[in-house]
């Protein structure tokens, strides 16, 4: 059965998410900020939960209808086949939001939707009681310009929770955003990569998982796995595919530098838990000492922002040292996420590309400074091939 599916993302990563979906074989359409729609069967639900690196959640759209008043909302919700997804004993909390609509009270929206689903399930299961002691099926109603969209969440915990990060550093970067930074860069598994402000290692680990083709969801479970109404075989097939897809360790180890030994200790632990410890070398090194004998590499990093006033002088001095470090890596490309307002002026260079992204609630810019293209490999031509 083909399903209407939605993958959600943080602002600014929609195009990256759409490319991920297309890489998995699903035609994707960006419908609004943070929402990419596609279609697929139960296997598509399992595969996208396992494989999407920049998605927050994968949802099934149960229905969409006009809802200019509460009667229309109730009738439209009641008409949907909720018994197809929600078992008799399932827990089904309802969340809601309303934008530019006549129905402005979100609590009232939630109550109306809950009541409609309860009545539909009672009728479908010929019962007066719904204990809600079973698997959780989270429902969301979103009313935009008097059109209600009803979805159920198949992911459970947000997809940024890969399962490898059990310790939290001073300013952790969400795994989905870290993966997005890598996917927006020029890095490939055969090129050098350094994060000079690696912290607890998230960018390096996500890059290693991308380079090794390790599905980010291999170490966790998902809400829909527990639904008795869902095709259980889909998860087994998707897991088998993901386990078989893993590739050999990287020939070029990723480097993660930081000055904080506690952060580096966490980074090593997280890399081990992710199964990529042999693909990354973490070391204590100051940014000013950054150098490499390698060519055509990538710096992908999330340096300190200087959010607190007492940090700003130190952070400005750090940023002012960037041109000298860049100059020492003339063939490299640099990808820097920061909220510093005049970053390009401080570093003395205009970025080839910029993208607005949010790190938690902080508005940032992802600056992309492009180095020269690596030379094409020389292919020897044998005499037998000469015309």
Image: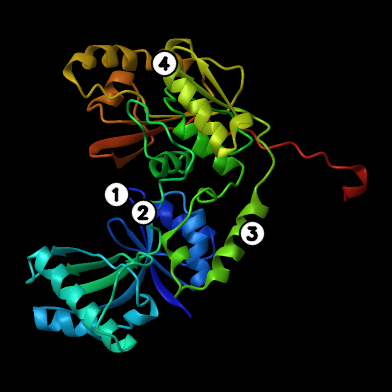
N-terminal of the pair, mark 3 or mark 4, is 3
Height in image: 179 above or below 119? Answer: above
| C-beta proximity under 8 Å, tags 3 and 1 | no
Height in image: 354 above or below 323? Answer: below
SS at badge 3? helix
Q: Count residues near mark 4 (Cα–Cα under 10 Å), then give few for <14, some for 14-19, many for 20+.
A: some
- Nearer to us of marks 3 and 2 is 3
Task: Please name the residue that numbered disc 3 is placed on.
Answer: 240
Q: Nearer the viewer, residue 35 or 231?
A: 231
N-terminal of the pair, mark 4 or mark 2, is 2
Lateral position of residue 251 relative to residue 157, left or right: right
N-terminal of the pair, mark 3 or mark 1, is 1
Q: Residue 13: percent from the left, percent from the top? A: 36, 49
Residue displayed at 34% across by 29% down: 350
Q: Is residue 337 visible?
A: yes
Q: Residue 254: percent from the left, percent from the top? A: 57, 28
N-terminal of the pair, mark 1 or mark 4, is 1
Residue 11, numbered circle: 1
Residue 346, numbered circle: none
Mark pair 1, 4: CA separation: 30 Å
Residue 260, numbered circle: 4
């Amino acid at each position: 059965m083909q399903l209407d599916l939605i993958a959600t993302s943080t602002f600014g990563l929609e195009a990256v998410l759409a490319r991920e979906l297309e890489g998995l074989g699903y035609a994707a359409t960006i419908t609004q900020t943070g929402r990419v729609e596609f279609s697929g069967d139960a296997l598509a639900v399992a595969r996208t939960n396992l494989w999407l690196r920049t998605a927050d959640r994968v949802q099934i759209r149960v229905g969409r209808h006009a809802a200019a008043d509460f009667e229309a909302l109730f009738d439209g919700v009641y008409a949907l086949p909720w018994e197809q997804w929600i078992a008799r004993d399932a827990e089904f909390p309802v969340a809601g939001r309303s934008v530019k609509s006549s129905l402005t009270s979100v609590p009232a929206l939630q109550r109306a939707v809950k009541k409609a689903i309860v009545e539909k399930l009672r009728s479908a299961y010929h019962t007066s009681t719904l204990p809600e002691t079973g698997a959780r099926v989270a429902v969301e109603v979103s009313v935009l310009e008097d059109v209600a969209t009803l979805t159920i969440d198949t992911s459970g915990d947000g997809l940024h929770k890969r399962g490898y990060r059990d310790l939290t550093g001073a300013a952790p970067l969400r795994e989905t955003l870290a993966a997005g930074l890598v996917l927006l860069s020029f890095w490939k598994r055969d090129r050098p990569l350094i994060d000079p402000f690696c912290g607890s290692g998230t960018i390096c680990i996500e890059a290693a998982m991308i380079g090794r083709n390790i599905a980010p969801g291999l170490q966790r479970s998902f809400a829909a796995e527990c639904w008795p109404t869902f095709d259980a075989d889909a998860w087994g097939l998707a897991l088998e595919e993901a386990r078989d897809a893993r590739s050999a360790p990287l020939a070029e180890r990723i480097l993660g530098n930081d000055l904080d030994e506690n952060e580096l200790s966490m980074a090593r632990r997280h890399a081990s838990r992710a199964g990529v410890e042999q693909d990354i070398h973490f070391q204590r090194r100051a940014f000013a000492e950054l150098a490499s004998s390698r060519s055509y590499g990538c710096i992908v990093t999330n340096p300190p922002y200087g959010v607190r006033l007492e940090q700003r002088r130190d952070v400005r001095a750090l940023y002012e040292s960037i041109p000298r470090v860049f100059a020492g890596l003339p063939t490299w490309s640099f990808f820097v996420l920061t909220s510093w307002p005049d970053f390009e002026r401080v570093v003395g260079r205009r970025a080839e590309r910029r993208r607005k992204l949010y790190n938690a609630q902080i508005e940032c810019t992802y600056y992309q400074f492009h180095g020269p293209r690596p030379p094409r490999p020389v292919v020897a031509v044998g005499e037998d091939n000469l015309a």
